[in-house]
């Protein structure tokens, strides 16, 4: 059978695999489900265009073969990803792969190195995709190999996205300005929303973005060879940025981009003038838009426009709110989500009653109704905001502890499941390796105990949600 796949067409590839077979069988046998792992390896081979280079790596690096076996035995999504992009395994050969993950400055330098030799705009976009893919794989493998806490992966995925977005925006602006020039005193701020804003992205998260711009009010158009009116200029620049991040190139997409959290949602302009943004949130914003604003942050914090945006968000969230009216709006929104996306069970960690959405809604509600007299509670990150509620006496220690414990457990499980699976998690049918990984990460001795603990955590969140949002309105 192996001879019929592309990776095995050369005689040298077949020789190398023949040498590897005893080690391969022994390695796959040590996974939780050897039959499943062998079938996954067969699928992995079928997706490879050629096998010589990879088999040579396996022969000289047995640990790499062991890592592949772990992936094949526990993470079907990651295994499928590897079959399409086997070159990401090269990153594992870096001597520092299992050391401390790089900080923001190191990530920024790595992106610069990865793109420094791009010979065209298109080549730049491809290099960004290759580098982003390798770095997300690195984070995922560290979680999978239990050398990095799953709960901490969200911050790493988000920091990587921040750097890639900033770098892409800089290059897009430079290329755009070469055609259309600049706007007097013009500036563009990329705003992170949703999971990116809250610094808790997963392996499969898209980018929730909003674009804000400003310019000299006396300036009506750009100064380039092909001048554009100001609003048209920033609309097109935003479109170019979205395309640079999300377009399918020969190296795939960098990220999917979602702009629905901008003012007025899909009906609003894709780029918003800062004055229009401020006016909208002073006069017209719906409760759900104010909720979304609790997670908004400027990705590049150094510009005057970013500082002005941050100040305007703080002011908008600190306006006095009617407790009962906001509670009713939040509950109505949660019910609409439930109707549109009913949970299939407790392992639908995001949408289940007492799941991640409920914890997030609790935090957003408490920020909206208490920030007026306690502005220090504002924070885009869910766990930090819960700790601030406790510090300010908005929730007692018992409630804070229950929310933090439940959110930590569900975040850990969610990171692993998003990394490993493309479909819904069914404990009885999941690979044994995945079940073992979930138990290690959650520090539970048995899947039945984990299942029961998850149910208890969600019930505690549901009870707190009802107490805070429905019983006192």
Image: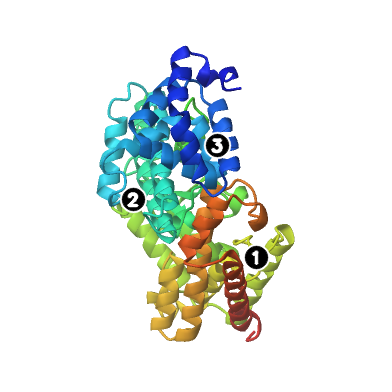
Is residue 425 visible in the rendered image? The answer is yes
Q: Is residue 417 above or below residue 44?
A: below
The answer for how far apart the CA atoms under marks 3 and 1 are is: 26 Å
Mark 2 residue element: loop
355 versus 463 height, above or below: above
Residue 216 appears anywhere in the view: no
Q: Which mark is residue 346?
A: 1
Crowding at dot 3, Cα within 10 Å, few <14 / some 14-19 / many 20+, comes out as many
Pick the front one: 375 or 460: 460
Judge depth for marks 3 and 2 and give the one in front: 3
Q: Where in the figure is residue 56, as x and y percent of width and height? A: 38, 25
Residue at the disc numbered 2: 300
Looking at the image, tell me whether mark 2 or mark 1 is earlier in sequence order: 2
| Residue at image location 53% in from the left, 44% down from the top | 73
**What residue does disc 3 label?**
80
SS under mark 3: helix
Point out residue 252 in the picture as x, y percentages from the top left corner.
50, 31
Please state, as top left, top right, bottom left or bottom right, where the C terminus lies in the image: bottom right
**Camera-side mark, 2 or 1:** 1
Tag shown at residue 128? none
């Amino acid at each position: 059978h192996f001879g019929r796949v592309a990776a095995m067409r050369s005689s040298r590839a077949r020789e190398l695999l023949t040498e590897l077979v005893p080690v391969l069988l022994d390695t796959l046998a040590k996974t939780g489900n050897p039959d499943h792992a062998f079938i996954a390896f067969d699928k992995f081979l079928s997706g490879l265009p050629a096998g010589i280079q990879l088999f040579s790596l396996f022969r000289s690096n047995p640990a790499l073969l062991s890592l592949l076996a772990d992936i094949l035995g526990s993470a079907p999504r990651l295994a499928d990803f590897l079959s399409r992009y086997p070159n990401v395994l090269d990153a594992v050969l870096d001597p520092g792969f299992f050391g401390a993950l790089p900080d923001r400055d190191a990530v920024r330098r790595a992106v610069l190195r990865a793109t420094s030799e791009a010979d065209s705009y298109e080549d730049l976009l491809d290099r960004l995709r290759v580098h982003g893919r390798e770095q997300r794989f690195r984070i995922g493998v560290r979680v999978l190999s239990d050398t990095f806490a799953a709960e901490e992966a969200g911050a790493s995925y988000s920091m990587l996205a921040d750097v890639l977005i900033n770098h892409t925006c800089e290059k897009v602006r430079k290329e755009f300005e070469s055609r259309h020039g600049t706007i007097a005193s013009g500036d563009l701020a990329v705003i992170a929303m949703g999971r990116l804003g809250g610094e808790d992205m997963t392996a499969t998260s898209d980018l929730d973005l909003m674009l804000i711009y400003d310019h000299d009010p006396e300036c009506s158009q750009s100064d380039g060879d092909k001048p554009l009116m100001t609003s048209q200029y920033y609309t097109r620049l935003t479109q170019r940025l979205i395309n640079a991040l999300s377009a399918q190139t020969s190296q795939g997409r960098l990220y999917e981009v979602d702009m629905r959290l901008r003012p007025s949602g899909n009906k609003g302009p894709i780029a918003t003038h800062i004055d229009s943004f401020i006016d909208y949130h002073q006069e017209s914003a719906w409760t759900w838009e104010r909720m979304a604003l609790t997670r908004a942050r400027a990705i590049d914090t150094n510009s005057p426009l970013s500082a002005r945006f941050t100040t305007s968000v703080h002011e908008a969230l600190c306006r006095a709110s009617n407790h009962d009216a906001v509670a009713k709006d939040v509950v109505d929104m949660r019910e609409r989500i439930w109707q549109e996306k009913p949970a299939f069970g407790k392992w639908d960690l995001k949408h289940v009653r007492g799941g991640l959405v409920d914890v997030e809604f609790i935090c957003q509600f408490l920020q909206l109704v208490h920030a007026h007299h306690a502005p220090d509670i504002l924070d885009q990150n869910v766990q930090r905001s819960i700790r601030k509620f406790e510090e300010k006496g908005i929730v007692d220690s018992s409630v804070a502890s229950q929310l933090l414990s439940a959110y930590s457990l569900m975040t850990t499980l969610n990171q692993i499941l998003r990394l490993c699976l493309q479909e819904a998690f069914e404990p009885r049918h999941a690979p044994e390796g995945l079940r073992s990984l979930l138990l290690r990460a959650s520090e539970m001795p048995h899947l039945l105990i984990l299942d029961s603990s998850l149910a208890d955590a969600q019930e505690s969140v549901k009870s707190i949600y009802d107490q805070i949002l429905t019983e006192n309105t």
